[in-house]
Image (spheres, rainbow, N blue to C red):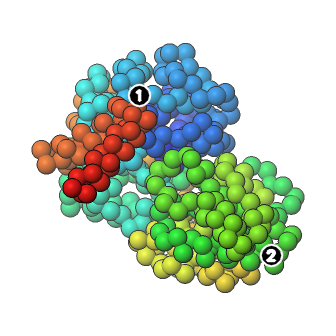
Amino acid sequence: MLAVADSDSYLKWAAGLLDAMPSDWVTELLVVRSPIAPSESQIQAAVSGTRIGRAGGPAGSDGPGEGGGGLPPVLAARRLRRAAERFRPDVVLLACTGPVVDVLAAEILAGLRPRPAFVSGLPGISVPATEKAWLYRSGCELFVVHSGREVREFAAIGTALGGGGSAAGGGVALARLPYLDLGGPVPAERDRVIFATQAKVPRRREERETVLLALAALAEARPDLDVVVKLRGRDSERQTHNERHHYERLWLAMAGEGRVRVDALRFATGPMHEHLSRAAGFVTVSSTAALEAIAAGVPLLILSDFGVSAEMINLVFEGSGCLGTLDDLAKGEFRVPDGEWCRSNYFHDDAESDWIDRIRELAAAAGEGGLAPARSLLGGPEHAAARRRARVRLEVPPRVLRYGYRARRRVRRYLKAL
C-alpha cells in the first residue's frame, strides 16, 4: 500500500492506519507538496508513536525505491507520480483534503498500471456526514470512517448520490481511530491541563480571547497545575485548515495590553499522546483529541459556550456527559464520559472494524486486474476549473503561489481604486 498525505492531520491519520495494518504488508508513506504541507517538526509529531516515527531520522526527499529512509518525504506532484510508478501499489490511501483527493485520483495518479484501488476517508470526527466530503472522494473505491453512526450516514449519502466503489470491498468501511492506541506508560505525576486548539472554531477573536481568559483564571487559581495550550502548529506553520486568530498570537497581544500575565500559560507543540500522558484534565471546543483524552483516561471538558452544532463540530458530544462551560474550566471541573456514549461513538469493539478485510478484497481484485474503477461525481466540465486550481496548488511551488496570490490581490486593489 502507498499512502499519500497533504497536511498534518491527514499525515497523522495515515501513519496511524499504516501502523494498524498487518505486519507483512509492504507500505510506504509520502507527503505531497502543497501550500498546507507540514513542516519537519509537524511531520515528526504526526508520526510519533507509530512504526514510521520509531524508525526516526529527518524527513528526506526520496520516495519508494529511491533508497529513502527516516520520516516521510515531501514530494512534488510529478515526483509523486514517478514514485507510484516504481512502487506499483495494489492500493493507494489518499489521506488528503477533499480537492487533493479528487485531483490525485482523477489525474495525477490516474492511469497507473496495474490500476490500484483508491482508498480515502476522514481523519477524525465526521458527524454529521456531509455530501461535500463524499463528492470529493467519490472517485475512490473505499471510504474509511470511525464510528457506526458515520458509516450509516455516509452510506446513505453514497446511496443517494452514487459514485464511490461498487466493486468487491467497495463502499464505506469502519476502522478504529488509530490515535486512540498510542498511549505509553503513565507517569506517576499528572499535573497538566491541556487545551487542544481547533483551527476552525470558535471563529471570532473575542470568543477565543474568552477561552484564554478562562485558562488564565484556572492557572491563577491552581498554581499546582501546568496549563498548556497545545498547538497544531506555530503561527508560522500551516495546518489542514487556516487559523485566522492564532491563540499564541492573541495571547501575546493580550499580555502586551496588560490583560493577562504572559507566563500564566504555556504554549507547546508535539505529539498529543505525550502531552496526555501527564494530563490531569483536558479541554477543547472541538477536537478529535478529545477522543484521545478519553482513551488515555483523562477527565475532559467540551466547551458549549459557543453552541453545540454541526458548525461548531461538536454535535457528536451531545449525550456524552462531557459538555461544560468556561466557568467550569476556570474552576477546573472536568467530566468522565458516559460509557454507553463511548460504545456508540468511536470506542466500538475491534471485531466490528472491517476496513482491513475490505482493503484486502480490493487489493486482490486490483492484483487480478479486474477492479472496476470508482465513478467520480466531479468528472463533468462544470468541475474542470476547480480541479485545475487544485492541480496548480500541487504542481507550483508554494512560494511561487504566494507571490502569485499577492500580485493578484494588488491588481484587484488597483482596479478597484480606478
In the image: residue 11, left or right of residue 391:
right
Rendered location of residue 387, percent (x, y): 24, 42
**Percent coordinates x, y for residue 363 in the rendering:** 37, 32
When the figure is inspected, residue 294 is found, relative to residue 302, above or below; the finding is above
**Neighbourhood count class around disc 2 (C-alpha, 10 Å): few under 14, some 14–19, many 20 upward:** some
- Disc 2 is placed on an element classified as helix
- The residue at the point 36 percent across, 63 percent down is 129
Q: Position of residue 21 (x, y in %)?
A: 53, 38
Q: Is label 1 or label 2 in front? A: 2
Which residue occupies the extreme bottom position in the image?
Answer: 327
Question: Measuring 27% from the left and 47% from the top, which residue is drawn there?
Answer: 411
Which residue appears farthest toward the front when viewing the image?
418
Look at the picture and state if 238 lies above or below 287: above
Q: Secondary structure at mark 1?
A: loop
Q: Which mark is residue 76?
A: 1
- The amino acid type, in three-letter code, at marker 2 is Glu
The amino acid type of the residue labelled 1 equals Ala
Mark 2 lies on residue: 220
Q: Nearer the viewer, residue 178 or 268?
A: 268
Which is nearer the eye, 119 or 274? Answer: 274
> Which of these two is toward me, 354 or 381?
381
Real-space CA distance between mark 1 and mark 2, rounded to the nearest whole angstrom: 48 Å
Quadrant placement of the N terminus: top left
Q: Is residue 121 visible?
A: yes
**For this rendering, which residue is in front, 130 or 400?**
400
Image-quadrant location for residue 120: top left
Q: Residue at x 66, y 50 (%)?
A: 269
Residue at 86% in and 70% down: 224
